[in-house]
Image (cartoon, rainbow, N blue to C red):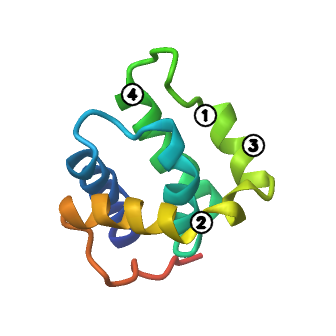
């Protein structure tokens, strides 16, 4: 992965942390990952998710990497409602999420 794209991913993790200072609630992961899927590869989503899972701390409400992989590979991410997307988008905007797309991946 090139440096610009990697920096974008790390900035995204920081935006999520600012938008969700106490961690992402389980019910917001579907919409959050659904939004990411529009911009990032599955591998990039998993990298971001690993950071968010680590931040969550492991209580009984914490989503796991396995949960996220299941969402990515299933049809769950397509099920985010407009209200879910609006709620998650508001959290990201509060954290300073830019409207610009990430730099394109280089192969």
Numbered badge on residue 70:
3
Say which element carries label 1: helix
In the image, taking residue 77 as reference, residue 10 lies left or right, namely left
- Quarter of the rendering containing residue 59: top left
Say which element carries label 2: loop
Foreground: disc 2 or disc 1 = 2
Note whether residue 1 is visible. Answer: no
Q: Which residue is mark 4?
A: 56
Q: Earlier in the sequence, mark 2 or mark 3?
A: 3
Q: Quadrant of the C terminus?
A: bottom right
Task: Give how far across and how far down residue 57 sits, in percent.
Answer: 38, 20
In the image, taking residue 94 as reference, residue 23 lies left or right, namely right
Say which element carries label 3: helix
Say which element carries label 4: helix
Note whether 85 is above or below 55 in the view shown.
below
Foreground: disc 4 or disc 1 = 4
Q: Which residue is mark 1?
A: 65
Q: CA distance from mark 2 to mark 3?
A: 19 Å
Note whether residue 90 is visible. Answer: yes
Q: Earlier in the sequence, mark 3 or mark 1?
A: 1
Q: CA distance from mark 2 to mark 1?
A: 23 Å
Label 3 crowd (10 A; few <14 / some 14-19 / many >=20):
few
Task: Give how far across and how far down residue 58 sits, in percent.
Answer: 46, 17
């Amino acid at each position: 992965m090139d440096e610009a794209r990697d920096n974008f991913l790390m900035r995204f993790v920081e935006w999520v942390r600012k938008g969700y200072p106490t961690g992402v609630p389980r019910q917001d992961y579907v919409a959050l990952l659904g939004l990411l899927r529009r911009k990032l590869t599955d591998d990039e989503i998993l990298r971001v998710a690993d950071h968010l899972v680590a931040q969550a701390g492991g209580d009984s409400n914490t989503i796991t990497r396995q949960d996220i992989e299941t969402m990515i590979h299933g049809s769950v991410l397509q099920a985010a409602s407009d209200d879910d997307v609006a709620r998650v988008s508001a959290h990201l905007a509060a954290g300073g999420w830019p409207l610009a797309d990430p730099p394109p991946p280089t192969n």
